[in-house]
Each structure stands twice: as C-alpha cells, then as structure tokens.
Image (cartoon, helix red, strand yellow):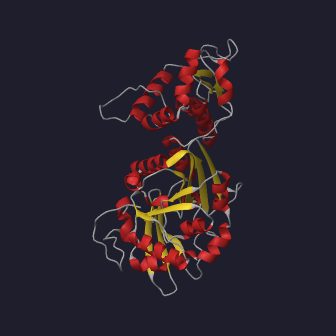
Amino acid sequence: MSINKQKINPNRQEYGNDPLGVRDTSHYQAEYIQSFVSKWDELISWETRAKSEGSFFIDILKQHGVQKVLDVATGTGFHSIRLLQAGFDVVSADGSPEMLAKAFENARSHGLILRTVQADWRWLNRDIHGKFDAVICLGNSFTHLFSEQDRRKALAEFYAALNHDGILILDQRNYDTILDVGFSSKHIYYYCGENIKAEPEHIDEGLARFKYEFPDSSIYHLNMFPLRKNYTRKLMFEVAFQRIKTYGDFQETYHQNEQDFFIHVAEKSYKNPTLENSTMKYSPTVNTAREYYNSDSADSFYAKMWGGEDIHIGIYESENEPVFDASRRTVETMASHLNLSKDTVVLDIGAGYGGAARYLAQTFGCRVKCLNLSEIQNQRNRQLNEEKNLTSLIEVIDGSFEDIPIDDNSVDFV
C-alpha cells in the first residue's frame, strides 16, 4: 500500500527498541517481509475462506453491474483470482512488491495472468490509469493507515478512480468490540488456517499490534490502527460517497459485538428517486441552485473542503486554524446567545449536511427542523443523524425558503 525506499531486511521484521511506538503508515513494507509473505496463504487457507464467504462479493458486484474491478489490496491474490475466474476484468494493485510477486505466482498456478501495479493509495491515480466500476480494499488492509490525513487521501483516490456510478467495497476488523469488550474470534471467515494463532498482543485507541504464531514456532507481528466502524463510515461520507451499507460477517443483519469483520459497500453516486420529481415544484432560480448543490462536483467540494458539517464561514483564532474548527465555533457562538432547551424547536434554513443541527440537538436536547433544497445533502444529513441516534430530534425537510413547508408559529428560533 505505501511505497518507501527504506532498506528492508527480507527475513526479519524491524520495530526498533519500541515496537508499540511504531505507528507510521510508511512502515507497511517492512512488515510484509519475504518469510512472512511465504506463510500468508497458510494463515488465510484459501479453500476454507472461499467456503466461508461464498459468492458474497461476486453477488454484490453483479448486482451493481460491475465489469472492471480495481483490487487495491491484492495481497497474495485471493480475491483478484476469484474475480478473474468469475469473469470480471481485474487490475491488481498493492504497495508490497513481495505480496504482488506472490500473487502473480499464485495466479499462474491457476492458469491466469494478473495485471499487477505497485501503488501507494495516497497517490493511486498517479500509477493507475482509467476508471473502474468497483474498487475493492479487502483483508483488513485499510487499517495500515495511521493518520487521518492518509485515510482521507486514500479514500479520495479510491473515489476518483471510480466511474460516476461505481462502488467501493472496504472491510475491517470489528475493532469496536476488541477495544470495548476484548478480543475473541470465530476463526471461520478471514484467517482460516489451522493451528495458527492470530491475536492482539497490545490494543489501545491508536494501535492494534497483532501477533501471528505459526506451527513451526515462527512469530510475526503487524502494527495497525484500530478503526471503529462508524468512524470509517463517517470518513466515507465526508469524502463524498453517497450511500453506505455495512454488513457483519457477510450478513445484512447482525449483532454489533458478535461479528469478527465489517464490510462496507459505498456508492459513489446515489440516485434519489425524488430528484426527478422535484424540478417542477421550484422556481427557475431556486432550481438552478438546487441542481448545483445536487451535482457531484459541488457535493464533493463541500464534503471535502468543509468536512460535510457546519457553515461556510467561521470565527478564526489563528490564520492556520482548520475551517472545521472555525465554523463550529461560529455555531457555538450563535447558540450561546439563545436560551435553548429540550422544549425548544429550531428551524435551520439551508442546513446542508446538518452539522449545526446535530450540535444543537446533542448539546441542548432541542428539536431541529433542517430545511434544505439539495436532496443529495439531505440524504447524507439523514444518514449522519441516524448514526448519531438523533433522528428523534432532527427532522430533515426537502424544500426552499421561498415556500417553507412548515406551519406558522411552530418554531422558537430560525
């Protein structure tokens, strides 16, 4: 995933004097050394894993009409090879040359030739050309990114590599349960090899250090960032993915603490059926603005530049302060001048993605009506409210301030 020019010992993982202090995206290649990669398929157990996941990924790709797939975390080639066998057009990328070499070897043993590219996710489109119907990032690979900036950059690159109606499929361990409850594993979905231990040696909010012990007594480690499920979903929304569906161990319905892995399926362009039916109810001027805010370019710009949360202006305390902090301070300042309580109803006109409404509802317990003319922004607003369990306090309304569809004298503040 990450490409660097450090000298790597092919037979020994190097973590220095403080293994728990190694929390760096660029350390990825030094972990996947030749001897570890040679045992990776033993850890996975291709036959058992194929049985456990069945046709889950193939079915999802077919449901979305996918033909061209970019596998950005190829590893030793398990999913690239399965998708080629299923008839998909696949490009296989990875940051580890050792992994790509092993994947190419595995493909040849199956009578296939992989098109492989060594690429860093953060600059993916520098090395990968063309557009794809789907990008897949599987095998808990996204967890190798240690900084939020790297995660946002990688997701933006995935987004840019997709056709307008493409999908991203990204999986992760259930770190929420590991952090909050403790580690357990059914050992039947991802790492299916027999007589191999794969368990956390250390876990905190910034590091999950896993230990892998093989039957020949060889031991390897991986340092990873413990992504929480809703945090990952939040990043996807903020990068501008429109609709995200999350599965637990390949199941649509699940109990949060009983799953080993989550699989997120994110759509680049969500076609809202109300869009085609809404044009006639607005004036030409309002509809021009509506079409602009519903466009992919505007939605992507506001989600990335403004974080998909608060208003576009801010009260800055320094010239280098992030716009998110400054705009949130503006909301806090305005709210401080109001006598808000759980009995208060606020109308937020031009609510956008609803950041101000969520702040008011969470902080004061008041009810908020979000009026906004962009159905695309409103869809994400509703999804973010659902994630925060705020749907009982926040109502999102499609509409224009030229004709506000709210009863007179029904709100306390606008």
User: Looking at the figure, which quarter contains the N terminus?
Assistant: bottom left
Q: Residue at x 31, y 71 (%)?
A: 17
Residue 35 in picture, x, y percent from top left: 41, 80
Q: Is 290 drawn above or below residue 150 in the view shown?
A: above
Residue 157 in picture, x, y percent from top left: 44, 49
- Residue 411 visible, this orientation: yes
Residue 124 in picture, x, y percent from top left: 41, 54
Question: Residue 192 vs residue 14: left or right?
Answer: right
Q: Residue 176: which quarter of the image?
A: bottom right
Q: Is 23 drawn above or below residue 362 in the view shown?
A: below
Q: Residue at x 62, y 27 (%)?
A: 366
Q: Residue at x 61, y 53 (%)?
A: 66
User: Looking at the figure, which quarter contains the C terminus?
Assistant: top right
Question: Residue 324 vs residue 85: left or right?
Answer: left
The answer to which of 113 and 279 lies nearer the viewer is 113
Q: Is 319 drawn above or below residue 349 in the view shown?
A: below
Q: Residue 117: which quarter of the image?
A: bottom left
